[in-house]
Amino acid sequence: MFADFSRALSQLSDPRFLRVVALGLGLSLALLVGAYAGLLLLIDWLAPATVEIPFLGPVGGLETLLSVGSFFLMIGLSIFLMVPVAALFSGLFLEDVVQAVEERHYPSEPAVPPVKLADSLIDALNLFGLLILANSLALLLYFFAGPFSPLVFWAVNGLLLGREYFTLVAMRRLGRQGAKALRARHAGQIWLAGALMAAPLSIPLVNLVVPVLGVATFTHLFHRLNRAQ
């Protein structure tokens, strides 16, 4: 699997890879900026001009304080939110990544019809929802895991990324049921490969490349496992 990752990494400069990274980054930042602007408008609408504090009387500036606090809150949340958001947007264009990998490394494989946009959207939304739900639940585990929190993060996200990215790649050639059957036979290896993808998720900006590298890595992994049957 390290060889699969290395081959994916060596192709990162491919224009089709860079296009998907740029689209995912741009759309993700636009959504987060829009969400932050909406939060500021909500604060401006709800926050009172002054607050009556016992022994001190009316105190102003609450709106400014909340606005400054919300900025740091969004910075913190973006570390967790950027991953599923980037996965959502990048998932719409990952077919280009799979095709780029197969054209370079597996030219003898027969061409397959491109995945329909509606199917790509459904798969991207499913992954987005799973990542949000799993990481929300994992926040509770982080509290108890202490210094082992990174291991929990890698295990949870590795399981999901491995499951979804392998299925996305495999079902192009085997169908959804065939992809699930192949995934079940190699569940451990796929989970470890997903954990390898999850390791950079905690690094801001680097995590935006994970969807592209993940799909490229699992494209190599799929062809290796499928040929070994």
Image (tube, rainbow, N blue to C red):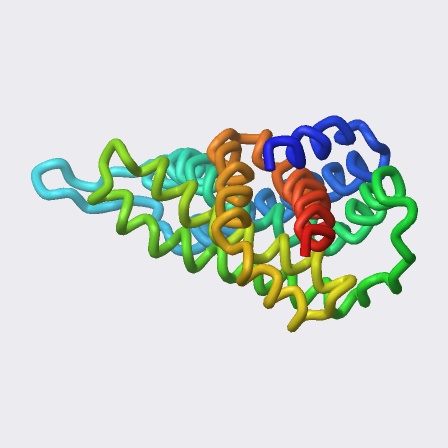
User: The C terminus is located in which quarter?
Assistant: bottom right
Residue 200 against residue 31 in the figure, above or below: above
Instruction: Tally the numbered discs.
Output: 0
The x, y position of residue 63, in whole percent, is 38, 42
Residue 9 against residue 33 in the figure, above or below: above
- Residue 60 image-quadrant placement: top left
User: Relative to the observer, which residue lies in front, 146 or 108?
Assistant: 108
Q: Is residue 67 visible?
A: no
The x, y position of residue 153, in whole percent, is 39, 42
Q: Residue at x 52, y 47 (%)?
A: 189
For this orientation, the residue located farthest to the front is: 229
Q: Residue at x 55, y 51 (%)?
A: 162
User: Relative to the observer, which residue lies in front, 86 or 47?
Assistant: 86
Q: Residue at x 83, y 45 (%)?
A: 102
The x, y position of residue 88, in whole percent, is 63, 54
Q: Is residue 22 left or right of residue 102?
A: left
- Residue 61 image-quadrant placement: top left
User: Relative to the observer, which residue lies in front, 76 or 1?
Assistant: 1
Residue 8 against residue 180 in the figure, above or below: above
Q: Residue at x 24, y 38 (%)?
A: 59
For this orientation, the residue located farthest to the bottom is: 177
Q: Is residue 201 left or right of residue 170?
A: left
The x, y position of residue 180, in whole percent, is 60, 66
For this orientation, the residue located farthest to the left is: 55
Q: Is residue 116 left or right of residue 107?
A: left
